[in-house]
Image: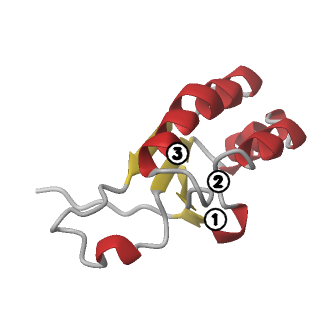
Amino acid sequence: MIKVFGYLKRKPGLSPQEFADYYEYNHVPLVLSKAFVPIVYKRNYIQRGDAFNIEGDAIGFDCMTELVFADREDLSAWMASLGGDEIARDEQNFIDRAATRAYVVDERTTSG
């Protein structure tokens, strides 16, 4: 399996709730209309002001998106099927793309 974590920052002027609403009700349906659904497509929104957030409100992103694919070939096929331009245009509506970061990771699990 291969995972991609995207750390997305909301566009200036959007509240955290407006960002989450746009992502869930506009962007996710657009993405799903263009490409097959990955094994996992999770969006994890930072809970601003929570005492457990060590960095407080200085956290540099608003959502951690997790995508899981069977292998690199599936990841490449998914990326190719998105079509790029329309997705990128939509991201301009709610994401600060200059602050976005994405990482491919190799997961190791220990269970007891």
**Residues under numbered marks 3 and 2 in contact, where contact means CB atoms less than 8 Å apart:** no
* Labels 1 and 3: the sequence-earlier one: 3
Q: Calculate the distance from the C-alpha at mark 3 to the C-alpha at mark 2.
A: 8 Å
Assign a secondary structure to mark 2: loop
Dot 3 amino acid type: Phe
For disc 2, the marked residue is 95
| In front: label 1 or label 2 | 2
Q: Which mark is residue 60?
A: none
Assign a secondary structure to mark 1: loop
Q: Position of residue 42 (x, y in %)?
A: 45, 41
Dot 2 amino acid type: Ile
Q: Residue at x 58, y 56 (%)?
A: 13
Q: Residue at x 48, y 72 (%)?
A: 60
Dot 2, crowdedness within 10 Å: few (<14), some or many (≥20)?
many
Name which quarter of the figure residue 100 lies in. Answer: bottom right
Q: Residue at x 15, y 68 (%)?
A: 51
Task: Please tell me which residue lies in front, 9 or 43.
Answer: 9
For disc 1, the marked residue is 100
* Labels 3 and 2: the sequence-earlier one: 3
Residue 70 in the figure: left or right of residue 64: right
Residue farthest to the top, as pictured = 33
Assign a secondary structure to mark 3: helix
Q: Which mark is residue 19?
A: 3
Q: Calculate the distance from the C-alpha at mark 1 to the C-alpha at mark 3.
A: 14 Å
